Amino acid sequence: MSYICSSIKISGVISISEVAKNKVITLMKDDGFNHKSDFVRVGVKSGGCSGLSYEMKFDNKIEENDKMYEDNDIKIVVDKKSLLYLAGTTLEYSGGLNGKGFVFSNPNANRTCGCGESFSL
């Protein structure tokens, strides 16, 4: 089922690199999602070796406390609690033999773990 959101689209909170955009489109299609109508849900939760860790999944249902943004033709949804932690973050993708997959480049993080999946402020 596809859900088209009429939320205000604001750029600048989370951006997505061109390489990450292309990978998101491919993976969304593989998982039965459409990047034109569905979105990437990004959040922060307690845990990880640095205190906080990133969450990312594809979704098509907007929740009451969600905010939708759009960058590089990709819709990104963030819950209100995660917004302060993610402001200014760029979603990047690193492939290849030593690639890490999706990487969050977060200017708010004071410390990150070696795998890049958790951080602290």
Image: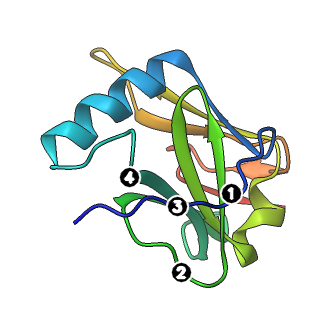
Query: Which numbered tag is attached to residue 102?
Result: none
Horizontally, is 92 left or right of 68 in the view? left
At x 26%, y 42%, the residue is: 28
Q: CA distance from mark 3 to mark 1?
A: 30 Å
Q: Is residue 94 visible?
A: no
At x 44%, y 37%, the residue is: 102
Q: Which residue type does callout 3 highlight?
A: Cys
Displayed quadrant of residue 97? top left
Q: Which residue type does callout 4 highlight?
A: Asp
Nearest to viewer (mark 2 / mark 1): 2
Q: Secondary structure at mark 3?
A: loop
Quadrant containing the N terminus is bottom left
First in sequence: mark 2 vs mark 3:
3
Horizontally, is 3 left or right of 65 in the view? left
Q: Are marks 2 and 1 in contact (CB under 8 Å)?
A: no
Horizontally, is 37 left or right of 48 in the view? left
Q: Which residue type does callout 2 highlight?
A: Glu
Say which residue label 3 marks.
5
